[in-house]
Amino acid sequence: MLTIYGVYRSRASRNYWLAGELGLPFACVPVIQAYRLEDAQAADAPLNTQSPEFLAVNPTGLIPCIDDGGFVMTESLAINLYLARKHGGPLSGQTITEEAEMLQWTMWAATEVEPHSVKIIMLRDPAVLASEQGRMTIRAANKALKKCFERFDAHLAATGHVVGDRFTVADLNLAEVFRYAMSQTALFDAAPNVKAWLERCQARPAFKAMMEARSGEPE
């Protein structure tokens, strides 16, 4: 049995979405981020990333984390590549070249896109956005992301997918990274292929089911 550690309002959302796409049965252990709690060490604190029970599973104290029949793994995007490879089907690479492309694009998203897109979602507080520092951070993130959007838009022009001519784990991984930047509508309007691709990804039943579960958790 696959066990996924992490609340839906975290990067674990990527793993819950993929499990849904693959039709995998799984157990959910809703570990919450310690920084979201007033006192993560309090006796009545919910299971969190500083809880001894979780640290016994993942000493890094980060979510998500999976236990797949005794194999413990961290890093959400890598977890998805592993699960897709293990269970096969159209979401996985059908050739070694496709597998390499999926790894390449996932690494690109993690190193070139997410460092900037995550700043956008972390600055959702209106008070922060109203500050000069907040506005400067958003402008810098948009400037960096503009080149990423341009490159990805040109890539999607051919088939509308990250790898091959179908939805794969690479689309899912990148869709979750690009989701962080959704509030920056100008970026998507300037990259119509990216905008249409993300809309298609998020129209999938497994994504909607994941987001419904996510919305049921406290912010």
Image: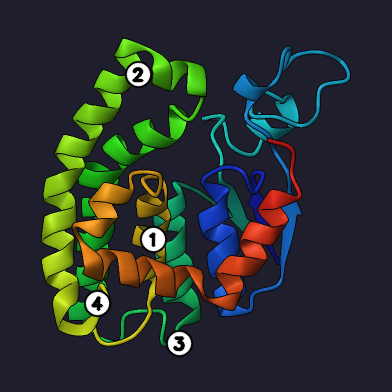
Can you identify the residue that label 3 sits on? Answer: 89
x 24%, y 50%: residue: 187
Alpha carbons under labels 1 and 4: distance apart: 13 Å
Quarter of the picture containing the N terminus is: bottom right
The picture places residue 215, in percent across and down from the top left corner, at 69, 50
Q: CA distance from mark 4 to mark 2?
A: 35 Å
* Residue 163, disc: 4
Instruction: Tell me the crowding category of disc 1: few under 14, some 14 to 19, or many 20 or more residues within 10 angstroms, Cα based.
Output: many
Q: Earlier in the sequence, mark 4 or mark 2?
A: 2
Element marked by disc 3: loop
Q: Amino acid at mark 1?
A: Ala
**Mark linked to residue 134:** 2
| Residue 207 rendering spot, x and y as whole percentages | 56, 67
**Circle 4: residue type:** Val
Q: Residue at x 41, y 22 (%)?
A: 129
The CA span between labels 4 and 3 is: 14 Å
Which label belongs to residue 175? Answer: 1
- Left of 151 or right of it: where is 111? right
Kind of residue sitting beneath label 2: Gly
User: How many residues crowd around disc 2 within 10 Å: few (fewer than 14), some, or many (20 or more)?
Assistant: some
The reply to whether callout 2 and callout 3 are in contact (CB within 8 Å) is no
Q: Is 56 left or right of 124, judged from the image as shown?
A: right
- Residue at 44% from the left image edge and 36% from the top image edge: 121
Tell me if label 2 and label 1 are in contact, CB under 8 Å: no
On the image, the x and y values in percent for residue 185 come to 33, 50
User: Residue 91: percent from the left, percent from the top?
Assistant: 41, 80
